[in-house]
Image: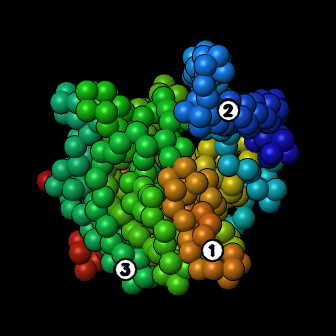
Amino acid sequence: MRAAQQRRGLPTELVDELISADEQRRSSIVAYEAIRGEQKNLGKLIPKAQGDEKQELLARTKQISQQVKEAEAAQVEAAETFERLMKTLPNLASADAPQGGEDDFVVLETVGTPRDFAAEGFEPRDHLELGQMLGAIDVERGAKVSGSRFYFLTGVGAQLELALTQLAMSKAAAWGFTPMIPPALVNERAMEGTGFLGQAADDVYHLEKDGLYLVGTSEVPMAAYHSDEILDAGSLPRRYAAFSPCFRREAGSYGKDTRGIFRVHWFDKVEMFVYTTVEESYAEHQRILGWEKDWLDALELPYRVIDVASGDLGLSAIRKFDCEAWIPTQGKYREVSSASNCTEFQSRRLDIRVRGAEADGGGTRPAATLNGTLCAMTRTIIAILENGQQADGSVRLPAALHPLLGEVLRPLA
């Protein structure tokens, strides 16, 4: 645990605090059980006692009753302290992940070649200018209605998102995923169980009156979908592809990517979510990445795959791969999808177990969970518009979208 904390660039003192809290928790249980045992024994002796002996036992009963209450309170307090500290402990970052922070990722693969717009004789427009020319994006009215970082998708913009949704869900179904549309509001246990009330808490929208949270990803309801259940090992892997709106405060991104729809408070997304065993999770992680690459290949986008550094991992993941599409007007690759292996972190919190795995001799153990973005709509739309644009402001679409939208999106007259 100390080594994993160091890989994340986090203090190791938390591990020492946890060890101390666990010792206190265990000793408080022993102390409570001892005094409670004496109380039960007294209860058996009193009916048999007579005279002074009985009076002494009754006096001791009053004494011990208070001691039992104090021991029970100490036990509860020790358990709560341990639980509170455990919830702050991230999953144990994989030793295979690059060590360091946000900029210390390793590029695993680069696919496709960015277009040379200068050689084609024109300066590329950014997605917002293209979106306005196509009648596809309206951020001014989005701000008027909801505030900054909101938008309307209009006309072909709305059609493009619906086409991407249909294509993504169809591909996921062909890969063996069960299509899902989960609730976008969840209770505290679902949010906390997936690790989103830890380091990401500031980005979460909370409806205090209702005790509910708006999800930032359908990973949350999908992880809680099998909470408090025991899954048969023979039914694994269980693969789901969920479409949902996603809501994020973007509290730590003030002033970043403010133009257009790149970093917004709400967007729609198709997310892959898998339940399996820990032993199988590593191969499944690679499969999820493979499906994400197949998706970007189908959209004919230049992209790269990075191995995210341990210090940039979320609370629940031991390792994460990001796929980053080339954004011409930014002159760099930007994240459009990610694939994370969360091993047992979420299933332990949500009590999701597997029964019948050979490694466990037919017993039960926590499941492993994985998630991977198939299509984050706004960023995918940005990448399609900017990479497919022509000098006249029209946008050539990838062949996979032709049956749904035709070959070209043309500017409004």
Q: Position of residue 363 (x, y in %)?
A: 63, 74
Q: Position of residue 409 (x, y in %)?
A: 25, 64
Q: Secondary structure at mark 3?
A: helix
Q: Is residue 351 left or right of residue 127?
A: right
Q: Is residue 286 left or right of residue 379?
A: right
Q: Which residue type carries mark 1?
A: Gly
- From what the image shows, is residue 365 above or below residue 50? below
Q: Are marks 1 and 2 in contact (CB under 8 Å)?
A: no
- How far is disc 2 from disc 3 in space, using C-alphas? 61 Å
Q: Which residue type carries mark 3?
A: Ala
Disc nearest the viewer among 1 and 2 = 2
Q: Is residue 398 visible?
A: no
Q: Quadrant of residue 302?
A: bottom right
Residues 306 and 25: in front is 25
Q: Which mark is residue 115?
A: none
Residue at the spot of label 1 = 363
Q: Secondary structure at mark 1?
A: loop
Q: Position of residue 238 (x, y in %)?
A: 47, 75
Q: Quadrant of residue 281?
A: bottom right
- The colour scheme is rainbow
Disc nearest the viewer among 1 and 3 = 1
- How far is disc 1 from disc 3 in space, using C-alphas? 31 Å
Q: Which mark is residue 173?
A: 3
Residue at the spot of label 2 = 38
Residues 26 and 194: in front is 26
- From what the image shows, is residue 234 above or below residue 56? below
Q: Which residue type carries mark 2?
A: Glu
Q: Earlier in the sequence, mark 1 or mark 3?
A: 3
| Residue density around tag 1, few if under 14, some if 14–19, many if 20 or more, within 10 Å | few
Point 72% across, 64% down: residue: 108
